[in-house]
Image (cartoon, rainbow, N blue to C red):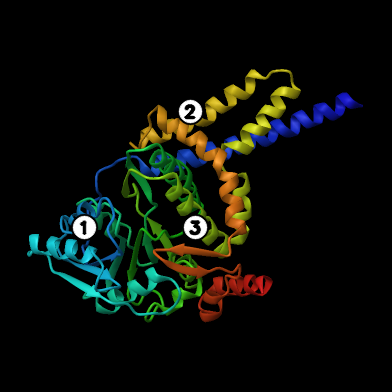
Amino acid sequence: MMDLVWSSATVIAAAGALALLAIHLVGLALMARACAPRPSPPLAAAPPISVARILCGLEPHSRETLESTFLYDYPVYEALFCVARADDPVIDLARAAMARHPHVPARLLVGEIVVGANPKLNNMGLAWREAAHQRVVFVDSNLLTPPCYLKRLAAVWADDVGVVSSAPVGARPQSAAAELEVAFLNTHAARWQFAAAACGRGFAQGKTLGLRKGALPLGDLRPLAAEPAEDAALTRLAEACGKRVALVAPPFAQPLGRRSFAAVWARQTRWARLRRASFPGLYACEALAGGAPAIALAAMAATLAGAPAAAAIFAGVWYGAEWAAARRCRWPSGARAVLAMAARDLLLPAVWLAGLAGGEVRWRGATVALSIAPRGVARRFAGAAPWAARLRRLARRQV
C-alpha cells in the first residue's frame, strides 16, 4: 500500500513539474518569436503624433532618454515634457534638450490636472488636454526610445486598437541588483505579457501608452482614476469598449545602470500590489510563477523515484531555455544573467506574499491606497460592449 502511495506521489509531482515546464517553454517561445530583432515595418500611413514625456526628478540616464525624444525618424510629431512642479530639477534638462533641437516642435508643460490619487495620471492630464494631435503617446521618463519608436507604434495602431503599449525590458545593467531587475523584467514579466497577447488577452504597461482621442471615452482621463494604476484601467476600458491592446514587438528598453537591491525590491513589490488590486484572480495564479515551484516538484519526483540527478537536468533545461530566449532577443544573457534568473525565482514567492500583504503603494513621494475591487471602470462604462456584463458581474462578486 505504501509503495502505491509513493508511486502516486511520484507521478503527480512529475506531472506537475512537466506541466509547468511546458507552460514555461511555450511562453519563452512566444516571447522569443515576438522580441527577436527585426527591421522596422514599412508604413502605409504616418499620422501626426504628440509624444508626452512624463517627468519627475532626475534619473541616471535622464539626459540620454530626453535627447532620444528629438531623434525620431518620423515625418510629423511634437514633443511635450510634462512636469508637475515648477521647481523640479529635470526642467533644466528638458529646456536644454529643446534648445538643441529647435527643428522639432516642443513644449514644456508645468502643472497637473488632479483626477485621482495617482500622481502619474495627474501629470498625464495636462498633456492630454494640450496635445496638438489626435494620437498621443505617453512615455515614461526613463525609457530610451530608438529613432524607429514612432514608426513601430504607428505600424500596429489599427482601427480596432484602443491602446498601443510595450513591455518594459531592462538593458545595460551595471550591478548585481540591476542584473536581478533585468531577470524580473525581461524573461519573466515580458514573457507573460507576450503570452497573454498571443492568447488574445493583451494588457497595457505604463512605460508606453499610445491613445487616440475618440477611440475610448476618456474625457479628461478621470475614468482612469477608477483603478490604482492607469495601465490597468486602460486595459479594462479597452475591453469594455470592444477594443484591443496592441503590443509593439520587439519592445523598448530602459537603461538600468547601477541599481540597489532595495530599489529593485520596492519596484517589484509595488507592481505586485498593483496587480493584486486590479487583477486578483490572475494574481492568485502568480503563486506558481517562476522556476521554484516546478523545480521543487521535479526534485520531489526525482527523489521518490531514486534518481536525484534528474532534478538537476530539469533545472538545466528550465534555465537553459530561458538563457537561449534572452540571447535570441539580444538581451543580457551572460553567466550573471542566469544566476540572476535563479535568484529572481527564489525571491518571487516573497514578492508575491508582499503583494498580498500591502494595502498601499508609494511612488515618487505619493501614497496610493489599494483595494481589491476592480469595479470603477465597469460601472462607468456599463453597457458599452459585451465585456461590460462580465465586468459588472465581477464587480458584484468583489463588493
Residue 323 location in percent, x, y?
A: 43, 31
Mark 1 to mark 2: distance in Å?
36 Å
Q: Residue at x 45, y 53 (%)?
A: 267
Q: Quadrant of the image for the C terminus?
A: bottom right
Crowdedness of circle 3 by 10 Å Cα count: few (<14), some, many (20+)?
A: many
Task: Say what amino acid the circle numbered 3 marks.
Answer: Arg
- Is 160 drawn above or below residue 185 in the view shown? below
**Looking at the image, which is closer to me, 312 or 361?**
361
**Distance between the alpha carbons at the discs numbered 3 and 1:** 25 Å
Does residue 50 appear to the left or right of 395 in the view shown?
Answer: left
Q: Nearer the viewer, mark 3 or mark 2?
A: 3
Which residue lies under the disc numbered 1? 66
Q: Circle 3 sits on which residue?
A: 270
Q: Residue at x 37, y 47 (%)?
A: 169
Q: Quadrant of residue 261?
A: top left
Q: Amino acid at mark 1?
A: Leu
> Taking 237 as reference, is 165 left or right?
left
**Pick the front one: 25 or 127:** 127
**Which residue corresponds to mark 2?**
320
Per the image, label 1 sits on a secondary structure element best described as helix
Q: Please tell me which of labels 1 and 2 falls first in the chain.
A: 1
Label 1 Cα neighbours within 10 Å, binned few <14 / some 14-19 / many ≥20: many
Q: Nearer the viewer, mark 1 or mark 2?
A: 1
* x and y percentages locating residue 13 in the rendered image: 72, 33
Looking at the rendered structure, the kind of residue marked 2 is Gly
Q: Earlier in the sequence, mark 3 or mark 2?
A: 3
Residue 201 visible in the snapshot: no
Residue visible at 48% across and 31% down in the picture:
321
Please state the total of marks drawn on the protein image.
Answer: 3
Crowd around label 2: few <14 · some 14–19 · many ≥20 (10 Å) = few
Image coordinates for residue 173, horizontal then vertical, percent: 34, 40
Residue 194 drawn above or below residue 360 = above
